[in-house]
Image: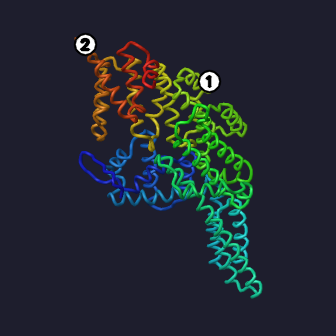
Amino acid sequence: MSKSKLKSNSFQTEIPASISSLYNLIGVLTRAQKRDFKKDTRFWNYSKSGKYLVLFDMVNSFINKGKDLESLTAHLIQSAKFGKLSQLTSLARYLLTRILESVRNRQEVSPETNRLLNMIQSINFLFYKGLFGECEQLINDAKKLANNLDKSTYLLELSIWERRLYVTTGRPLKELGKRLREIADEEQVIMRNLQVFFDINTLSNDLFLNIKEGSPISDVTEAKIAGLMAQNEDELLNNLPLRAKFWYYNSLFHYYENRHKMQKPALESDDKMVNLRLALECLEKIFGLSESEGKLIASEEPSLFNSFIDNYISLCFRLSEFSRVERFEKKILVSENEIQYYRSSVYHRLSHMLIQNEFREAGDFVTEIELFNRLPLFENRIEESRMIVLRYYSGLVFFVLEDFKKASEWYGLILDGTRTKSNPMLLISIELQQIVSLFELGAYKKKPSRPLDNFLGKLRRNKKLIDFYSKLIQAMKNVFEPKIPEIPGELESQNELLRNLLKENRIFASYFGPVVAWLEARVNHTTVVSEIVKYQN
């Protein structure tokens, strides 16, 4: 059971872990995966199968309507369809296993790794059924695939199966002794490769933590990096297993990033970006690997390579290497990898434009590439958190440009859609910007402050109301429904208070700066663009 608690009018209970996991799993399934799962259920022929489908549809419906886990759990527990809480959790747990079974059979991600896992399961079955010839052939095929994928742990497991097979099948003693010695030698190489990978992967992780924690590189880590850099790189790479080569360059990438972050103020003549340029070269070498000997690994590890691509494009923008970004985009589009284009390139372009206050250019870009119509094509193929931020950036561009109709359309896509993995503070910001957008479009003529009162109540019920939100919403209410007679200087004082709170808290400034900029623009009779720029300067 998880520790998060659920409250309703008539009960208070913990959210069962099985329901939480089921909600999270269904939330990330593609339409095709949901459809395939429902096809699989046609072959179930037992009495409870109807209940599983009802539960699946109910969870899916709540997710599609953007309702949270707490609302779902309350509804399920109060419903009479699933019996007692213990019966409900049992249903959810079993449904979870059947969904996972369905997606494993039609693996969209890492298909070759999934094939290797299935082969190992088949080897186990064939061995215990005494089908040793078929088992040996499958072991050989699986070892070739594991080698291609540089999966040393699986190679070790396959080697152990081969040992058992040779010992069990009564081979001639000479042949048995020769092959067992060969297997032992192969296992030594595997163990060495595993240790090398472990060392370099650990080094990369340590350097990554240094960056995140803002801590200097330790003497031990410096010595490890110095040891690697002292070697001839071609000879070093020849001795590294394929997967370790990626982590070698990733370690150097983090190392140079860290050196840039920790460097002291340079002389005017120094290149302040020299370490970032070296970091960029490391990422270029990673992509070189992924297009040659590491092509299969790159295709099997999409989340890992998404992070490499994100780091690369982000670093290009930091270094104003725009031509590199354009070349990279052309390469992506030539390979017909539109998902990568929208997920990474468009995301980082918008992010860069917003940082540079290039709002009009960003608006033109969003319109030119028809982003509003294109993004829905990649629903569930671009991860939910990235999709939400892409839509938020697009809405934010038009909010700042005071094109509230377009801003509202973008925010509506977020608020009406799936958001199981969204940032709670970002969602609060989006809801407030949506309320402002609809207010500007004249949606609240009769009782302008009602949506703000409703939102305030929602925050209070969900125990998310903090002093800053109360002050911000009160300032918005004073603009939505100005006091009569107006108290001189009141709005200016409220805005000054909010501005000072944003200065004290960079997180608030990041999420709620646009709303406060809109308040300032309303009071000062200026534009939101001018107020946003004023903040950031």
Name the disc covering residue 243, or none: none
Q: How is the image coloured?
A: rainbow
Q: Residue at x 52, y 28 (%)?
A: 354
Q: Which residue is mark 1?
A: 368
Is any atom of residue 39 visible in this view?
Answer: yes
Q: Earlier in the sequence, mark 1 or mark 2?
A: 1
Where disc 2 sits, the SS reads loop
Please tell me how crowded label 2 is: few (under 14), some (14-19), or many (20+) other residues with Cα within 10 Å.
few
Residue at 68 percent across and 70 percent down: it is: 189
Write down the quadrant of residue 244 in the picture. Answer: bottom right
- Please identify the residue farthest to the bottom as the structure is shown: 173
| Nearer to us in this view, 341 or 356 | 356
What amino acid is labelled 2 in the image? Pro
Quadrant including the N terminus? bottom left
436 relative to 419, above or below = above
Say which quarter of the image contains residue 341. top right
Q: Give the alpha-carbon distance from disc 1 to disc 2, as whole Å.
A: 45 Å
Frontmost residue, 37 versus 145: 145
How far across and how far down the image is residue 126, in percent?
A: 65, 74
Residue 122, image x and y in percent?
64, 69
x and y percentages locating residue 25 in the rendered image: 48, 51
Which mark lies nearer to you, 1 or 2? Answer: 2
Q: Quadrant of residue 343?
A: top right
Q: Is residue 256 left or right of residue 414?
A: right
Q: Up-down: is 471 above or below 175? A: above
At label 1, the amino acid type is: Glu
Location of mark 2 (residue) = 488
Residue 377 in sight from this viewpoint: no
